[in-house]
Image: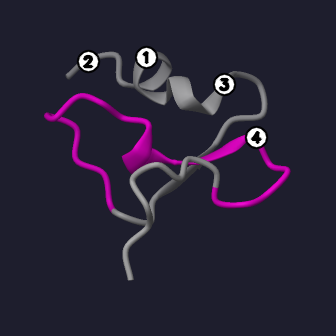
Amino acid sequence: MAISEKKIYPRSRDAETVYLKNVVTDPGICVGDYTIYNDFKNDPREFQTNNVLFH
């Protein structure tokens, strides 16, 4: 069973953790279907901007 492409947050009431596949927009960045990312300091939806510096 695949995760909905619209589901960003895997846990309710946890805005620090996201499914990366549903927030990364660059087709050159490969992300697994169930890969999650947590960022307690910045908006985790900005993973691509804040963490993929040299691609």
The answer to whether the residues at label 4 and label 1 have Cβ atoms under 8 Å apart is: no
Q: Which x, y percent locates residue 55?
A: 20, 22
- Distance of label 2 from label 1 (alpha carbons): 10 Å
Front disc: 2 or 4: 4
| Residue where numbered disc 2 is placed | 54
Q: How is the image coloured?
A: one colour
Front disc: 3 or 2: 3
Taking the image as shown, residue 36 lies to the left or right of residue 16, namely left
- Distance of label 2 from label 4 (alpha carbons): 26 Å
Q: Mark 2 belongs to which amino acid? A: Phe
Q: Mark 3 belongs to which amino acid? A: Asp
Q: Which x, y percent locates residue 37?
A: 57, 47
Taking the image as shown, residue 44 lies to the left or right of residue 20, namely right
Front disc: 2 or 1: 1
SS under mark 2: loop
Q: Which x, y percent locates residue 1?
A: 38, 83
Compared with 48, 1 (above or below) is below
